[in-house]
């Protein structure tokens, strides 16, 4: 796992890069959050491929538990991926509602590049 640090308008953002899945459980998400929190990051970018598929099945409640942890620490979370691969209407509604706020956002790779002002 590698952390790329971005600074945008004085906000420290940790972009978590890995070829492997790094969040398989709520506890792993909490450990990652705490590690980044104590490194004084304000926001975390995770890629959907690095999160266990149960996160995207709302019946497992994994997403709710993880997002609650991020909310408790007041750490913004952005999850990057292609969410059209998940046919669940409830997940689409959940993503839509999350994207209305600022605490948790679900975006595409292109939106990430735009937001960070990078080209890769």
Image (spheres, rainbow, N blue to C red):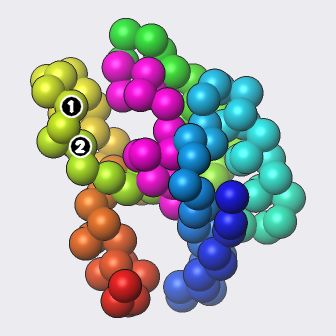
The tag on residue 50 is none
How far is mark 2 from mark 1, CA to CA? 6 Å
Residue 2: name its quadrant.
Answer: bottom right
SS class, disc 2: helix
From which residue to which does the magenta span run?
Answer: 42-57
Identify which residue is drawn at 50% across, 38% down.
51
Give left or right: position of 13 versus 37.
Answer: left
Residue 83: name its quadrant.
Answer: top left
Figure check: 7 above or below 73: below
Identify which residue is drawn at 35% across, 20% down.
57
Which image quadrant: the N terminus? bottom right
Q: Residues within 10 Å of mark 1 (few under 14, many from 20)?
A: few
Residue 80: name its quadrant.
Answer: bottom left
| Extreme residue toward the right, this view | 38
Which image quadrant: the C terminus? bottom left
The tag on residue 86 is 1
Give left or right: position of 83 versus 62.
Answer: left
Identify which residue is drawn at 73% across, 46% down.
32
Identify which residue is drawn at 71% across, 34% down.
28
Residue 89: x and y in percent read 14, 24
Figure check: 40 above or below 115: above
Residue 113: x and y in percent read 34, 79
The stretch drawn in magenta includes residue 53: yes
Residue 48: x and y in percent read 41, 46
Q: Is residue 77 visible?
A: no
Residue 33: x and y in percent read 71, 47
Figure check: 100 above or below 63: below
SS class, disc 1: loop
Figure check: 60 above or below 108: above
9 or 82: nearer the eye? 82
Q: Which residue is mark 2?
A: 83
Q: Is residue 39 visible?
A: yes
């Amino acid at each position: 796992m590698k952390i790329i640090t971005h600074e945008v308008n004085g906000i420290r953002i940790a972009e978590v890069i890995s070829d492997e899945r790094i969040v398989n459980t709520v506890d792993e998400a909490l450990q990652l959050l705490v590690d980044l929190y104590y490194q004084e990051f304000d926001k975390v970018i995770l890629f959907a491929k690095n999160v266990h598929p149960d996160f995207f099945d709302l019946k497992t409640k994994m997403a709710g538990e993880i997002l609650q942890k991020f909310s408790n620490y007041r750490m913004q979370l952005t999850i990057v991926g292609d969410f059209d691969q998940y046919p669940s209407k409830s997940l689409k509604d959940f993503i839509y509602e999350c994207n209305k706020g600022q605490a948790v956002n679900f975006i595409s790779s292109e939106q990430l590049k735009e937001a960070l002002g990078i080209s890769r």
